[in-house]
Structure formats: structure tokens, C-alpha cells
Image: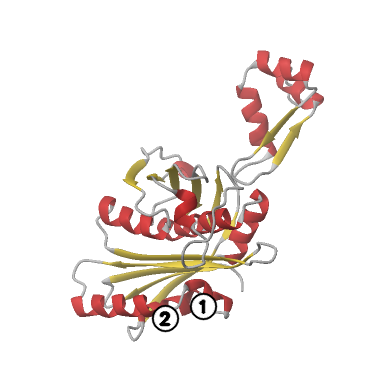
Amino acid sequence: MQDHLIQATAADSTIRLIAAVSTELVSEACRRHGTSPTASAALGRALTGALLLGRTFKDLEYVTLRFDCKGPIGGIVAEASAHGTVRGYVRNPLADVPLNVMGKLDVGGVVGEGMLHVIREAGYEIGLMKEPYFGSVPIVSGEIAEDLTHYLAVSEQINSAVSLGVFVESEGASVSASGGYMIQVMPGVDEEVMASIEKTISAAPHITELIRKGGDAEGLLQVAMGDIQFDVLETHSIEFRCKCSYERAVSIVTALGNEEVADMLEKDKGAELTCHFCSSVYYLDEAALRDILEPPDPPVM
């Protein structure tokens, strides 16, 4: 099933719903970074959570989730755009811990204590240099979904239910299912409706179980909402996509200054840069470094 995200409303627009199936993009991210099974689950949840959160702000261009944590994984960064693209990484991709008491991947154990920082940036693509918004809360469990729920309640004052899941196959450690949903209650919501949703969510099967059986984003919401009807407003494609490029790599090396570039040219005969977000490697050979030191004349018109 192709990755996708939907936005919906229910109960006369007093409930906002966003859900996504993100198996392909999470699988690609984990393959690029060579993550362990538990690190794959943590990274996948963060990437999906960033996509869900990013769709809650119409003028948002980028939202970044940054988990500064004390667990073996060392930290997680996930950045999503309003256009459905996401990228991210973990500081220690090989971090792993034993299964928890339920026999499942212990994401909370690999993340540990620390702080969750949410950064919202808007307007950069159209030249509006607005000040970024920063929100920070302590990590409450390290399970990612519970931490986002806590952030939304404390920093955004929005009561929400966030559910995220990543299924990693025991054979080969490949990601075979990933997705999540976010249900938010707005002012004026009926308390009986809230109670009904809480009941159905608590009894619902795990997200990855539904996705592995072929469930789509709308199906995830149908199970979570039970008998409560909702209207799907928009459907978006989503994908893992980085903003890095060879041109950006050249700009980074150029910014180091001529002395540093000359040293690279003399000692290493080139420069190699690896993108943290996608693990792409860019190599600048001797000719590229010489062009930085002595830019070629512009063409004559």
C-alpha cells in the first residue's frame, strides 16, 4: 500500500483527526541509516509523529521534533514539511535493548529520560523570516506517542490521543508496517462523544496489526472512532525526502573559508560530507576544491 495521510473531522468539527500509513518511508529511512530493530521503531514513530503534527498548522512549512535523551539511542530528530515530506535520524543507529516484559521492542528503554523539543518554522520558502516557535517538555515515557500527547496538552493546550506503531520483522529486521493517528478535541465537544472514543481506542487492536492486514489511514480512524462517523477532508501523499544536495555540500565547504579548503586540497585531495538526515555521501574532488578557491569566470553574454 502506498504511503498516505488523511485529514478528517467529526462531531460537527469539534474533533480533528489525522492518520497516516508510513511503511515505505520509514522502511527507507531505516535502510539508509542501518538502524537496529529498536532504533528503527523509535525513528519510525518519530517520523510519523512529525508528519501528523505538521498537518495541524496551515501556514507551517516545517516542524522539527528533537528528542534530547539519555538512553542508548542518544537522540532523535525528525523534520516534516507541510507538503508531506519528512526526514530524520537517530544519533546512535545501532542502539538496542532487550525486549520489554510484554515481549515487544522497548522503545522507551532505548530512548530514556530527557527533553522533547518541538520547533515550528513558517514562511521561509516565501521570504517571510518569522521567528521559529519553540516548545519543550520533559520526556514522560520515551514511547514517542505518549510524549507527543503530553507536549500537545502542556504546550498547545489541546487534549489529544496519539497512537504510533512500527512493526519490525524478526527475520531480517525489515519494517513491514508503520503508521499512526492523532485525534484532537476542540472546544464544545460533547463529553459523551469523548467517552465513546476513549472506550474504542482502549479496545482497538494495535495499529501495525491493522496495517499488516491491509488497513489504510481511513481504516485506522474507523477502528479508533467506533460508531462515530467522520468526514475525510483531504488525502495527501507522504514520503521520505531530504533537502541535501551536492550544491549544498559545496556551500558548506565554501563557508569553511579558503584556508581550510586549501588544507583539504593539500592533505586529502578532496572532501567528503555525509548528510545526518539521510546518510547520503557527497564527494568534492580536487577540481571542485580549486573552483572554490579560484571561482571560474562567469560566461560572457
As drawn, the label of residue 223 is 2
Name the colour scheme: secondary structure
Task: Write down the residue under mark 1.
Answer: 210
The reply to whether discs 1 and 2 touch (Cβ–Cβ < 8 Å) is yes
Instruction: Identify the residue at horizontal 20%, vertical 66% (top origin).
Output: 187
Instruction: Identify the residue at horizontal 66%, vertical 44% (top origin).
Output: 279
Q: Position of residue 223 (x, y in %)?
A: 42, 81
Instruction: Tell me the SS state at disc 2.
Output: helix
242 lies left or right of 76: right
As drawn, the label of residue 85 is none
Residue 186 visible in this rendered orientation of the protein:
yes
Quadrant for residue 288, please give it.
top right
Amino acid type, mark 1 = Leu
Q: Position of residue 96 (x, y in %)?
A: 57, 52
Q: Position of residue 25 (x, y in %)?
A: 60, 60
Q: Is residue 134 above or below residue 163?
A: above
Instruction: Identify the residue at horizontal 60%, vertical 47% (top origin).
Output: 93
For label 2, the crowd category at 10 Å Cα-Cα, with few meaning under 14, some 14 to 19 and many 20 or more, is some
